Amino acid sequence: MTQHTQLAALRAQLQNVFIGQEAVVEQTLVCLLANGHMLLEGVPGLGKTLLVRALSKSMSLKPGRIQFTPDLLPSDVTGHTLYDMGASKFVTRPGPVFCNLLLADEINRAPAKTQAALLEVMQERQVTIEGRVYPLEGSFMVIATQNPIEQDGTYPLPEAELDRFLLKANIDYPDHASELALAQGKAEPNLTELKAVVDQATVSELQAACSAITIDDKLATYAVDIVRATRSHAALMVGAGPRASINLVKAAKARAMLHGRDYVTPDDIKILAPAVLRHRVRVAPEYEFDGQDADQVVAQLISQQHAPTP
């Protein structure tokens, strides 16, 4: 089975479970191929947790899950050391981050100190417990879900943590036909019927192949120009940093591979730029008052940049 066939089978299986959310499924697979992390935002009940469970079962990866709550401690995330009376020694008890695919559910329900416990493991793929470093084995991906920050009991994520997510996907309500099919039980998700399409070794091979895809210098410049434009736009009080440029290029390569190409096109960059940038920029209050959001500003930036032609 070719890599493109494997990806097509994985995509089809996820779309059969996550009904009416094709764009979110594509962005999830882009994150996977680019070896990045993903932030999912949407009101409760749209299937954020379902997507992660389906992805885990489809890839034979070791899953982990953390339900973030206001009283969650950093050690509940990373693990801790305790004294074993029977063995008369200290024993390290690993936390749920020691896995391949971590669901950080409702991450913005916990205060900033606990949220920040994920920073090291997301960036370095390692965990420090009582001064000792424990590297993670195999691939590692965090899919964090959050409710809109306007809801009660939520905390905004620190900017340093937001920047660690390759992209942020917004889950909207399904269209009428999809919701009707769900309501009538004609498209009811069934996780028990899912089978593993790829394994750990295959995931690593796909990620390596994605990284090896080349991008034309003109297209790389196009991606960087879009990111740099966020730093001088009047509607933005905070622009995106260099990590956004790096991640936009990675995401564009991943989308090219997902569509069976070994080259990047301007559309790969245009389509993914909002997801890569929306959580890295901050709209000025006066523009927010006028009804503008990050996606609208990014769309303006893209329209002002000249896309290179072959």
Image (spheres, grey):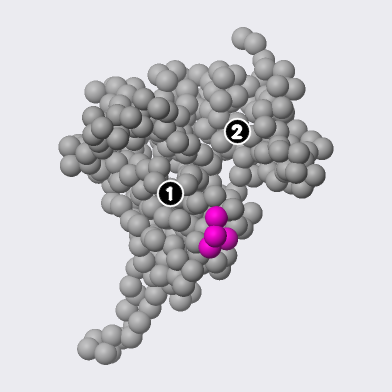
Q: Image check: 160 left or right of 107? A: right
Kind of element beneath mark 2: helix
The residue labelled by disc 1 is: 44
- Which is in the foreground here, disc 1 or disc 2? 1
Q: Residue at x 71, y 27 (%)?
A: 300
Outermost residue on the left side: it is: 193
Residue 152: percent from left, percent from top: 54, 60
Q: Nearer the viewer, residue 272 or 262?
A: 272
The quarter of the picture where residue 184 lies is top left
The residue labelled by disc 2 is: 274
Q: Quadrant of the N terminus?
A: top left
Q: Earlier in the sequence, mark 1 or mark 2?
A: 1
The quarter of the picture where residue 260 lies is top left
The quarter of the picture where residue 283 lies is top right
Q: Residue at x 59, y 53 (%)?
A: 150
Q: Residue at x 46, y 72 (%)?
A: 71
- Image: magenta residue range: 151-155
Q: Marks 1 and 2: CB-CB under 8 Å?
A: no
Type of residue at label 1?
Answer: Pro
Q: Residue at x 55, y 66 (%)?
A: 111
Outermost residue on the top side: it is: 310
Residue 112: percent from left, percent from top: 57, 65
Magenta stretch prevailing secondary structure: loop
Q: Nearer the viewer, residue 288 or 195?
A: 288
